[in-house]
Image (cartoon, rainbow, N blue to C red):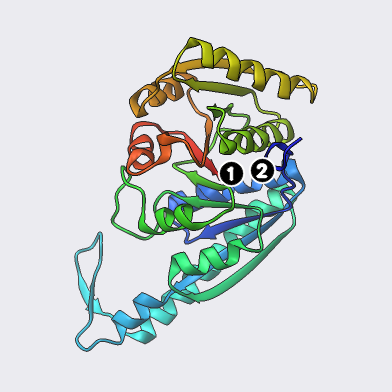
Amino acid sequence: MSEAEREPAIQRILVALDVSSYSLAALDAAAELAAGLRAELLGLFVEDINLVRVADLPFSREMGLFSATVRQFDRREVERQFQVQAERARQALMLIAGQAQVRWAFRVTRGPVASEVLAAASEADLIALGKVGWSLAGPARLGSTAHAVVSETPRPALILQGRVRPGAPMLVVYDGSPGAHAALAVATHLARRANRQLTVLIVADGSASASRLQAHADAWLWARGLRARSHRLIRADTPTLAAAVRAEGSCVLVLPGESPLRQGQALARLLSEVECSVLLVD
């Protein structure tokens, strides 16, 4: 068995917290996974150094996003907001981890957000983060922090678009690439531990290659005493994959690193066309 095909040991899950709705959805999903895997949750709140730098500029002002009122924006106010938001994040982690009965730890760091998340990821086996956080990226776009993290981390990264329904099925793209073997191993491990239905999406250039890939996936699952549904996608592009995902309803989609379906703008487009969460495995 190759290293890529071994089921992973996931003992610590990092969740990036900023108390946005996407971040709290990531926390919920991470807690459910941690409970099934008997893993520890590590909550991370990053004090964005860029906000501190802006606050130090002369004549800095802040406009309320909803009130449209202009108020003083200085270092003292930024530090106060950091403390308030960090405590809210810690309380949310404590509550949700307690409900899931999982071990947890909480950490506050300061620096560029993506850099701090990537640094903390070296201590974790899986990262969970919201699609967007404290930004104006909008619900249809992948936030800059999430984009930077998933582009650079070697760890599996779960991008949350909303709360994941408990027991929602898990889909995995299997195209025969080295990354697809790793994705199948991760998806199988998580589906079994969380008691989720697994569907293997066979992505191939033609019927013959699809049959070969399905035989390989079936054999891999059979050797572990597992079964899964399968669905063939011939010459799949982003709209084709999105349609297959939408047909499953609420789900978690696992994408391998080398898949063309996550290269360039394909991932952002996919996230804009489906409501499911996406787990990226390199």
Q: Is the residue under label 2 in contact with that under label 1 (CB below 8 Å)? A: yes
How far across and how far down the image is residue 237, in percent?
Answer: 36, 26
Q: Is residue 88 visible?
A: no
Residue located 74% across and 39% down the image: 6
Q: Which residue is mark 2?
A: 33
Position of 57 with respect to 253 (left or right) is left
Q: Does 220 sit above or below residue 231?
A: below
Q: Quadrant of residue 189?
A: top right
Q: Does 185 sit above or below residue 19?
A: above
Residue located 68% across and 53% down the image: 97
Label 2: element kind: helix
- How far is the residue under mark 1 from the one under mark 2? 6 Å
Label 1: element kind: helix
Residue located 43% across and 79% down the image: 80
Labelled disc at residue 134 = none
Residue located 46% across and 74% down the image: 47
Q: Quadrant of residue 94?
A: bottom right
Quadrant that contains the C terminus: top right
How far across and how far down the image is residue 73, in percent?
Answer: 28, 80
Q: Does 48 sit above or below residue 32?
A: below
Q: Is residue 82 visible?
A: yes
Q: Does 150 sit above or below residue 254?
A: below
Report the amino acid beneath label 1.
Ala
How far across and how far down the image is residue 110, in percent?
Answer: 49, 77
| 121 or 206: nearer the viewer | 206
Q: Which residue is mark 1?
A: 29
Position of 11 with respect to 60 (left or right) is right
| 173 or 128: nearer the viewer | 173
How far across and how far down the image is residue 103, in percent?
Answer: 75, 57
Report the amino acid beneath label 2.
Leu
